[in-house]
Image (tube, rainbow, N blue to C red):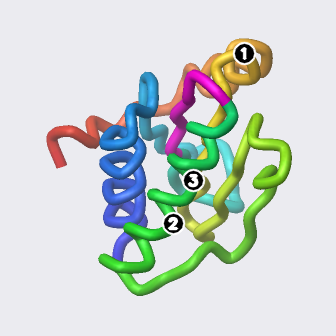
Amino acid sequence: MQPSDIALVAAKAADDKQGNETIVLNVESVLAITELFVITSANNPPQVRTIANEVSSRIREQLGISPLHSEGLAEQQWILLDYGDVIVHIFSEPTRRFYEIERLYTDVPVVNWRAM
């Protein structure tokens, strides 16, 4: 299984649950700890949790793996799901605007997950 398989399932799951501006960034050239970031956001905290649940369920069902680690489930403002080579970031809209994580990685390739 390739990291791109995990990222694709995660991005599609987020999009199916109305994740906003879902993107996949190839960060392997700037981060030694992971290869791909999947970034999405939701309009409210319950939707953040819903997207996180859908992403983990779909990856478990389709690829047979679970996150190595997760953070932020209780707060529902920024949930991180760590799959090793793929990190899924699910933000509430205000939190995404505050941290602007994409701005930190403007020099890395954006993966067109819709074409995969």
Q: Is residue 51 visible?
A: yes
Q: Where's residue 8, x and y in %?
A: 32, 54
Q: Where's residue 83, x and y in %?
A: 59, 69
Let me know if residue 42 is in the magenta part.
Answer: yes
- Which residue is depicted at the point 51% across and 47% down? 51
Amino acid on which the number 1 mark rests in the picture: Pro
Q: Where's residue 52, x and y in %?
A: 57, 53
Looking at the picture, tell me which residue is in the foreground, 72 or 44.
44
Q: Is residue 103 above or below residue 90?
A: above
Task: Give the Cα distance between marks 1 and 3.
Answer: 17 Å
Indicate which disc, 2 or 1, sits on the residue closer to the N terminus: 2
* Side of 111 where 53 appears, left or right: right
The magenta-colored residue range is: 38-44
Looking at the picture, tell me which residue is in the foreground, 112 or 13.
13
The reply to whether dot 2 and dot 1 touch (C-beta < 8 Å) is no
Amino acid on which the number 3 mark rests in the picture: Ala
Q: Give the residue pinned by disc 3.
A: 52
Q: Is residue 28 visible?
A: no
- Which residue is depicted at the point 40% across and 65% down? 6
Residue 16 appears in which quarter of the rendering?
top left
Task: Give the Cα distance between marks 2 and 1.
Answer: 23 Å
Indicate which disc, 1 or 3, sits on the residue closer to the N terminus: 3
Q: Give the residue pinned by disc 1.
A: 94
**Dot 2: element:** helix
Q: Give the residue pinned by disc 2.
A: 56
- Graded by Cα atoms within 10 Å as few (under 14), some (14 to 19) or many (20 or more), the crowding at tag 2 reads some
The reply to whether dot 2 and dot 3 touch (C-beta < 8 Å) is yes
List the single residue furthest toward the bottom: 64
